[in-house]
Image (cartoon, helix red, strand yellow):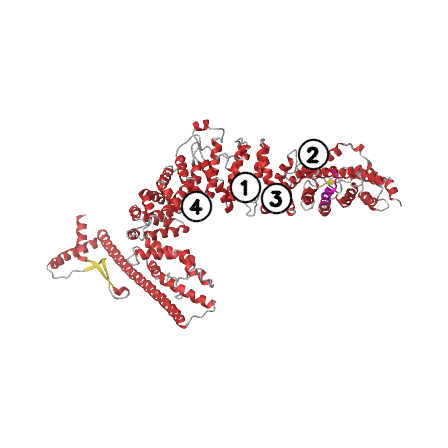
Amino acid sequence: MDSAAVLQRKKPDFYVVGPRAPGKNQHAPQVQSKSLDVTKVLHLLEDPLTANLKERHIFVLKKLLKRNQIGFLLRELTGLARILDICAEKVTDHPEYVPIVCEALRICRLPFLKERASDELNYAQDVIAFISHLGCLMRVSEADVRLQLLETVRSFFSNVAGQPRDGMDRATKLKPRTLPPYRFSILSLSLQPTSPGYRLQLLEHSDLTRSLLLSITLLEDQPAVNVQLLKTLQLLSGSSDLNCALILNVRGAEAICLRMNQPDLSGQVLFHSSEILWNLLESGSKAEVTAQLSRMECVISLKDAFFHKLMNSSLPPDLQLRNDLLVITTLIAENPNSQLLESLFLIELMVFITYPELKSHNPLVRNLKLSYNNEDLKMKKLMLNLLVLMSRDFAALQLYREAQVMRALLVLVKPPATRRERRSASRHWSPVQQEELQLQALATLSTIAPLILDDYMVCQGNTHLLLLLDWCVKQDPLFGQGHDSGRRGNKKPQMRHCIRLLRSVTFTGEESVNQDLCDQGTISQLLGILMQMEACPDEEDVVTLEIKSDIQLILSVLCENDMHRKELFGSDGVEMTLHFLRKGCSKFYSGLGHNKLILSTVDCVWSCVVGCYTTEDFFLAKDGVALLLHLLISCPRCVHGIILATLLELCDNPNTAPHIRSWRDGVGHTAPRLLLHLWKQEEQELGVTRNNGGGIEDPQNPILGQYQQDLQLSFPADAPSAAVMEISENLRAKIYSIFCKIGFQDLPGLSTKDYVILSIVRRYLDFKVSEVWEEISRELVLDDVRPVSPDLESLGDICVTAEDTARKAMAEQESILEQHEKENISEEALMYTEIKSHCKHRELKAKSWDNYVSKTSNYEVLKEIKAQRKKSMESSKLEDEGLIPEENFVGRVIAVERTEGHGPEGVNVTVARTSMKGADIKLKRQQMST
């Protein structure tokens, strides 16, 4: 049968199904007949007998597109993709196919249609392949096809954003009676559009983005299409990280950058190119983007674009684009392989970095017109930031010297001019802008100044900073209006950055810089600023605490190795350290910086006070040692090391030991007991094995921790071993050294367990030496090295001696514990004796009371007592004459004396003796008197 006849025949089942067949069984063949339509169209286009029937092709294709005005079915996309490919191939020789392709692309703007809910999942791969085929249509040289394709791709995003879809709106505006029968049939099948984000999700997995980017090389003679392509790529790169990855995989950042300077009267190419690069930097791999843009050709392209905008821009959008290009340049500068120097970009930019601070006769600067607006301010700050990023290159530092960058930065750092000077000067930065540039210049100098100290000293950088500090402590109502200032006239941000810069310069250790600072009175100036800030206790914020700690660190560096500077630190400096030590560490974990302030204070004591007898004696007279010990109790474990090291250095002064021995905390604990408690905690942290009494358990490893026991390695000769490294990593060596200074005898406030620990501390050095020899022996075994016989014998003797020392320490500890046990038994016996005495006394007292009650309540007893009274009177006369011995009973214990015996036999108790007769007489006299 002729295929043309088939296509021209009317098929009533296409358009009579809707009105007469509501059943499902009748729908199935109608859908199948429609699917055969796409198959027959493909057959018509591909069959060699009908491949050249252009008029029939166009007629059938128009009919097919008219039938799908509301969208393409998901299950037909595979055939439609093949149809579009065939039409795209015929466009070159037959331009009549261009409207067909454009109309098909216009319909693709509408959502695809699904017959079942599961179609979106079932036909996902078909949709991905169809979208990828759309990208291949960019090979068609016709501008209309390319523009329509790009508009279709952008419509994917507008549909998701909720914008109206023109094709669907037109379909809904038509009345049902005007629809042709086949359209009514399709609507009766209850077709539903796919979800709004369905195409975008599958677009990320297609090759559309890659194809569009690769087609950028085909559009040199079509600038309008090129602009639309860049708009589309901007939309794709800004919507998905996967799209950015696809662009970068084909070196899209490099391709965009190389073509950003193409001739374009509208100026849209450069704008959209920069936006695409921004999207790639934000959503893609920043390292990959900067690596692609770091090529020489890309850097030159960026340089040309930036200088073109710099010299020819005046409108705000153009100024913003200029700054965006500069930001991209700074990001490229972070890549160590960037070609900013080799491309002469940085060299040409250096003239503009130092302008207008330094006058220049460069013709480029003459043609530059700064408006001193916010965009120009941002450009200036970005240039200063670029200086910081490029300072890692030594060639850039030499360029800074030649361009006098240090001089320009110090001009920006200067205190602002007075109001009269600002009026007389030409148009320049406003006070607020000048403040921002001042802060940015200080931050830049903090990085650059330590690298080019020779320029810093030639330009008298120290003098500029000290003058700025003087200005910071003064009140200026027209300055300090922002940047965490808090209120007008507050120049705390300037002081913060100025102190940071001084810290970075002094930390280089250059003696000429530090000596110049001291010669200009920096020590006294910093102390005055510190105490002036401390006079306002309400300002306890992060900035204030950072300034205080940085000032203390600067003072520590200046005074650390110079006796004369410590004398300049003097009593005022000691008072400052004592003031901060009294604050304690209750706010250590506040998060504001109190922890840094505590550490810097202790470091200031170590560097500025210790080593000079004048400051040391003043520190000791003001109870500085007591403050350090109180801080040692309350501070966290991470601060113990520096406090103990400071105390150890102070112990070189002979006046320090009495202060340590006489110290007591709030509950009466002494300094030796505190140090021994820290020793015990340190050994628990290290996992050292101890017995129940706290003594040595393993004589072969008396002080070895669990980590060192598990570590069985051989270290190289130039690396410290574990036994040596352990000395610097914990507190035991410092505690032992302090005890060596204050002595091991007659220490106050120690318990028995403290003496057990003290016996280990006293032999710490012997144990450590034996531990090192043991480690040497173990490493020789691991390395399969046998020492010569004398050395082997010496190693054996050392191990035996070390073990004997440990056993002697164990014997001493056992003796201490036994003596403590004997004392406990003696105290227990004395306690029992006292208990018995008290019980006997209570019995006698109860008996006396019973006698008194019976006497007063029973007449017979009273007569008996009266008879006994007479008898007692007679006996008392005899007693006075010494004829009758006195009868006594035991009262209470008044003295205890220990002898050589064991247990109760070794205790002599002296008790009070009381006459029973005398007590009876005294009791009777009291009764008679009552």
Q: Which residue is mark 1?
A: 346
Asked if marks 2 and 4 touch (Cβ < 8 Å), the reply is no
Q: Which residue is mark 3?
A: 297
Q: Identify the residue at horizontal 39%, vertical 49% (top origin).
A: 635
Frontmost of labels 3 and 4 is 3
In the figure, residue 909 lies in which quadrant? bottom left
**Mark sitting earlier along the chain (4/1):** 1
The residue range painted magenta reads 130-142
Where residue 7 appears, x then y in whole percent?
85, 41
**Mark sitting earlier along the chain (3/2):** 2
Q: Which residue is mark 2?
A: 164
**Mark sitting earlier along the chain (3/4):** 3
**Residue 171, disc:** none
Judge whether 351 appears above or below 853 on screen: above
Judge whether 425 appears above or below 698 on screen: above
* Circle 3 SS class: helix
Q: Amino acid at mark 1?
A: Leu
Where residue 48 appears, x then y in whole percent?
85, 47
Q: CA distance from mark 3 to mark 2?
A: 43 Å
Frontmost of labels 1 and 2 is 1
Can residue 585 be seen by looking at this rendering? no
In this orientation, which residue lies closer to the viewer: 467 or 810? 467
Q: Which residue is mark 4?
A: 589
Q: Amino acid at mark 4?
A: Tyr
Decide if residue 427 is on the left or right side of residue 122: left
Decide if residue 354 is on the left or right side of residue 92: left
The prevailing secondary structure element of the residues shown in magenta is helix
Q: CA distance from mark 1 to mark 2?
A: 49 Å
Q: Amino acid at mark 3?
A: Glu
